[in-house]
Image (cartoon, grey):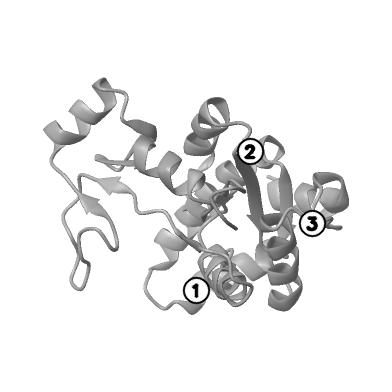
């Protein structure tokens, strides 16, 4: 894409364990091979850097006061408080990247997606990524080997709450076969026709994932 062809903002939302990060990295690589400038947007956060994280690459690390001033000065495209820490997307940098023809990926929840669609409806595309089944989602969370059974149960409840907002997105993509999912998301990013990415295509799965 060039400056003459405005870029796209790809909003990716999914429950933890659905594999959206792996999916996005694969698509970014595919886009680069096609000569497109594509990358993850770098968010602002008030949390402290974790080992190995670098400001400006992983996040823009700012103080609570700085974050609040950005909100008050209307410098945030979207923002949210998660577990007593703030996260947000810079408005000016996003618009600059889109005007330069970049494809920006945003890994955010439905709340942030809703804010972005309200502010940049013509420039953003919402994609919700679903796991192929509830069992597969639990297996992926357990496969990380990082959390207790109690924490995994909590993440499954959070996943259901997150997935209940699928209808607010332009596309619903099931990450079962990674190669198929990559091809579908790539087509969405390039503005090409895509099949199998409507909520109506996955009614039975959605009912299973959201069942009590």
Report crowding for label 1: few under 14, some 14 to 19, many 20 or more residues within 10 A (C-alpha): some
Q: Quadrant of the image for the N terminus?
A: bottom right
The residue lying at 74 percent from left, 61 percent from top is 187
Task: Locate residue 201 relative to residue 37 in the image: left or right.
Answer: right
Q: Are circles 2 and 3 on residues that touch, CB within 8 Å? A: no
Whole-percent x and y of residue 28? 55, 69
Residue 158 visible in rendering: yes
User: How far apart, in angstroms, are the residues tagged by discs 2 and 3?
Assistant: 25 Å
Mark 1: which secondary structure? helix
Task: Locate residue 123 relative to residue 203 in the image: left or right.
Answer: left
Whole-percent x and y of residue 2? 57, 55
Whole-percent x and y of residue 54? 20, 65
The residue lying at 80 percent from left, 46 percent from top is 199
Mark 2: which secondary structure? loop
Query: Where is 118 relative to 104, above or below?
Result: above
Mark with earlier residue (3, 1): 1
- In the image, which is nearer the foreground, mark 2 or mark 3? 3
Mark with earlier residue (2, 3): 2
Whole-percent x and y of residue 81? 32, 36
Mark number displayed over residue 192? 3
User: How far apart, in angstroms, are the residues tagged by discs 2 and 1?
Assistant: 24 Å
The residue lying at 19 percent from left, 27 percent from top is 69
- Residue hosting label 2: 165
Mark with earlier residue (2, 1): 1
- Could you say which is closer to the camera, residue 208 or residue 37? 37
Residue 133 visible in rendering: no
Report crowding for label 3: few under 14, some 14 to 19, many 20 or more residues within 10 A (C-alpha): few
Report crowding for label 2: few under 14, some 14 to 19, many 20 or more residues within 10 A (C-alpha): some
User: How far apart, in angstroms, are the residues tagged by discs 3 and 1?
Assistant: 36 Å
- Residue hosting label 1: 142
Task: Give the image quarter of residue 63.
Answer: top left
Q: Are circles 3 and 1 on residues that touch, CB within 8 Å? A: no
């Amino acid at each position: 894409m060039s400056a003459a062809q405005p870029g796209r903002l790809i909003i990716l939302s999914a429950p933890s364990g659905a594999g959206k990060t792996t999916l996005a990295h694969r698509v970014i690589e595919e886009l680069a091979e096609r000569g497109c400038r594509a990358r993850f947007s770098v968010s602002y956060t008030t949390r402290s850097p974790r080992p190995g994280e670098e400001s400006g690459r992983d996040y823009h690390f700012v103080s609570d006061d700085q974050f609040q001033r950005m909100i008050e000065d209307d410098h945030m495209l979207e923002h949210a408080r998660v577990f007593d820490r703030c996260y947000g997307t810079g408005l000016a940098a996003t618009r600059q990247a889109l005007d330069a023809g970049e494809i920006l990926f945003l890994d955010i929840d439905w709340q942030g997606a809703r804010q972005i669609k309200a502010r940049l409806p013509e420039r953003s595309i919402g994609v919700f990524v679903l796991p192929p089944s509830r069992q597969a989602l639990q297996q992926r969370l357990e496969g990380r080997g990082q959390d207790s059974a109690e924490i995994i149960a909590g993440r499954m409840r959070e996943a259901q709450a997150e997935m209940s907002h699928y209808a607010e997105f332009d596309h619903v993509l099931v990450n079962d076969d990674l190669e198929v999912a990559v091809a579908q998301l790539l087509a969405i990013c390039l503005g090409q026709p895509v099949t199998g990415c409507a909520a109506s295509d996955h009614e039975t799965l959605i009912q299973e994932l959201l069942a009590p």
